[in-house]
Image (spheres, grey):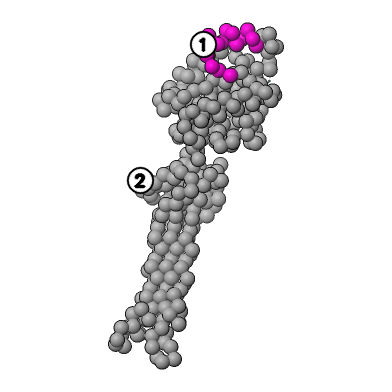
Amino acid sequence: MIDKCNITIESGKGGDGMIAFDNNRKADGGNGGDGGSVYVIGDTNVYDLSKLSELKKVKAQDGENGNKNKKTGKNGDDLEIHLPLVTKIFNQDGTELLTVSKSNIKVKLLDGGKGGDGNFTLRGDGWDGKMSRKKGGLGSIKDIKLELNFKSDAIFLGFPNAGKSSIVNSLSNAKYKVAPYEFTTLNPQLAVMGRYVLMDLPGLIEGTSKGKGLGLDFVKHTKYAKLLVHCISLENINIIDTYNRMRKEFLKISEGLYSIPEFVVFTKADIFSNEQLVLKKKELSKVFKDAIYISVYRKEDVNLLKEELKKRLSSISNSVV
Ligand SMILES: Nc1nc2c(ncn2[C@@H]2O[C@H](COP(=O)(O)OP(=O)(O)OP(=O)(O)O)[C@@H](O)[C@H]2O)c(=O)[nH]1
Ligand SMILES: [Mg+2]
């Protein structure tokens, strides 16, 4: 997934006005059409900047020149750049230009050049107007930098191998890589559960805050999340300690991350017999009042988690998109 790119944008040039005469030698040259403008628009069907990063430059269409018979040239088509949520746009010098955080809202970045007047518009009484026309206005050109911060409703975090990707896959149509070793997930990955966007993240370890493991690049993507799903494998011998160590790491990473409402999900429930699980739950419920226990291999567990997530997310606020 490409989450950064530099690109040159250019609006269309206005078409030139025309000098033309009808059969009675009267001025009848039309005006040039306006050049297309450049817009950006948030689009939830776009997931990263890869398409855009392949293009060095994008340009709106030029307006067509005016024509005889007072015909105005066709306006150039606007260029709409569809961007994933949330994309921050910066000027070349690094100052922030705008943030695209809502879908389907169009924002203009560059105006197209105005079409030039033809000699019919400029005709006047004398000869001068009849022989004059205006050239179309030039388009504008600008270098911008784009940076994508993934926007999701719920983020899935925890130690490596906790089963985060397995859960995200089971809740959605995603088929992200799952494997029995640490750091299988290397980058944030998005999945859709009904009207909600889920984000599976790389595993965190103690020291992530200091750049250990896969580092801190992921933090910017967590900013908009409404719910932090903290996944803890029941394989851990001391679960309360595992939980506390991760909470401390969240705080060291950022206060913003630490303060996202948390929902604890205990994973791999199938490794215990029913009797063992009842005992585990009894012990853990003293500390974790409303945690959920799931095995991704049990449909009823997955459905229960899905309903619980929907309930929590709908009570927190509207979906991000
Ligand atoms: N028995 C059992 N194994 C599970 C369950 N969920 C996941 N696993 C296994 O646990 C291992 C790790 O699963 P992942 O989903 O890759 O874990 P992760 O937390 O995304 O791991 P990283 O991306 O490395 O942080 C895989 O071998 C999974 O098959 C479960 O409910 N029960
Ligand atoms: Mg993973």
Res. 174 image quadrant: top right
In the rendered image, the vertical position of residue 281 relative to residue 206, given as above or below: above
Q: Are marks 2 and 1 in contact (CB under 8 Å)?
A: no
Q: In the image, residue 119 lies at what x, y percent?
A: 37, 81
Question: Which one is in front in this view, the residue at disc 2 or the one at disc 1?
Answer: 1
Secondary element at tag 1: loop
| Pointer 1 local density, CA inside 10 Å: few below 14, some 14–19, many at least 20 | few
Q: Residue at point 50% right, 19% down?
A: 246
Q: Secondary structure at mark 2?
A: loop
Is residue 204 on the magenta stretch? no
Q: Is residue 282 magenta?
A: yes
Indicate whether 37 appears above or below 133: above
Q: Which residue is mark 2?
A: 95
Callout 1: CB less than 8 Å from ligand 1? no
Residue 255 point in image, percent of width and height: 40, 25
Disc 1 marks which residue?
287
Visible in this render: residue 124? yes
Residue 30 in the image: state x and y as whole percent.
42, 78
Q: State the residue in front, 315 or 269.
A: 315
Which portion, as a residue range, is magenta? 277-292
- The numbered mark, 2 or 1, whose residue comes first in the sequence reads 2
Q: CA distance from mark 2 to mark 1?
A: 46 Å
